Image (spheres, rainbow, N blue to C red):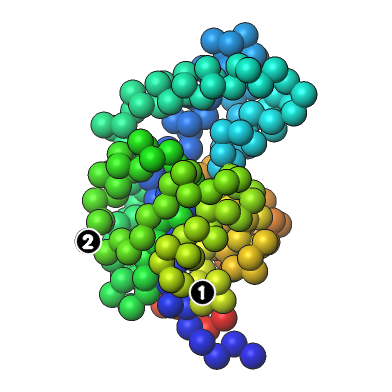
Amino acid sequence: MATERPTGVLFDVDGTLVDTTYLHTVSWWEALRQADQQVPMATVHRAIGMGADKLLDHLLGPERDRDEDPKLRDAHDTLYGEYWERLTPLPRAADLLRACAERGLRVVLATSAAEHEVGALRRALNADDVIDTVTSSADAQQSKPAPDILVAALEQSGLAAERVVFVGDSVWDVAAAGKLDIPCVGLTCGGTSRGELAGAGAVAVYDDPAALLAELTDSPLTRPR
């Protein structure tokens, strides 16, 4: 029987707190196009949330010439970097983080973004005063849907898996959390539907950070597990 409330919330960042999903989609699409790999944008979008290694496996197949992967990643990073100064938080994202902190929840950014991207995301959020711990891709051996980044977030924050909730926007987020039996709250603001997130195992689904904030008191973030 559930008797204890969560003590912390792990947040994905790209597509969950900062409006970057489609920027990554366009950047990967263009990087692939430059390498004469024609992949529809809709297909690319469905893979966003994976790390670059698994994303390329997913889009191009595991039997591809991996010697081209560094060029593809560099092209994506260059293209995406053009947006850094224009990154925008999703509705009331910082307010949601502050509301969690005010309720005594530790706020952890469990992001798989590359280290050089994390600073731009944090500047866009402008909520460092309530953020306890931040990860990056350097902290995980394998990317989502493997749970490595969540394991790193727990280890760095000192939080226990049975006392946290994860908030993400992709089916890969839900899958990663499920491997650790961490409840995952889904947000549709990354472009994945309510049905897909719920079907993947999300315990609750909201439109965006503002919608979650409006129902925070009755959400899985504050209810006993």
Instruction: State whether residue 200 appears in this view.
Output: yes
Q: Quadrant of the N terminus?
A: bottom right
- Residue 106 at x, y = what percent? 37, 70
Q: Please tell me how crowded label 1 is: few (under 14), some (14-19), or many (20+) other residues with Cα within 10 Å.
A: some
Q: Residue at x 37, y 65 (%)?
A: 107
Residue 213: quadrant of the picture: bottom left
Q: Nearer the viewer, mark 1 or mark 2?
A: 1
Q: Please tell me how crowded label 2 is: few (under 14), some (14-19), or many (20+) other residues with Cα within 10 Å.
A: few
Q: Residue at x 48, y 49 (%)?
A: 139
Residue 210: quadrant of the picture: bottom left
> Looking at the image, how many numbered discs can be counted on the residues?
2
Q: Residue at x 42, y 52 (%)?
A: 135
Query: Which numbered tag is attached to residue 129?
Result: 2
Q: Amino acid at mark 1?
A: Ala
In front of the other: 128 or 90? 128
Instruction: State whether residue 189 appears in this view.
Output: no
Label 1 to label 2, Cα distance in Å?
23 Å
Q: Quadrant of the C terminus?
A: bottom right
Does label 1 or label 2 sit earlier along the sequence? 2
Q: Secondary structure at mark 2?
A: helix
From the image, tell me which residue sits under label 1. 160
Q: Residue at x 30, y 39 (%)?
A: 120
Compared to residue 145, the image places residue 157 above or below, namely below
Q: Amino acid at mark 2?
A: Asp
Query: Which numbered tag is attached to residue 12?
Result: none
Furthest residue in direction right, as rendered: 63
- Residue 71 at x, y = what percent? 52, 17
Image side of residue 112 versus residue 162, left or right: left
- Residue 10 at x, y = what percent? 46, 62
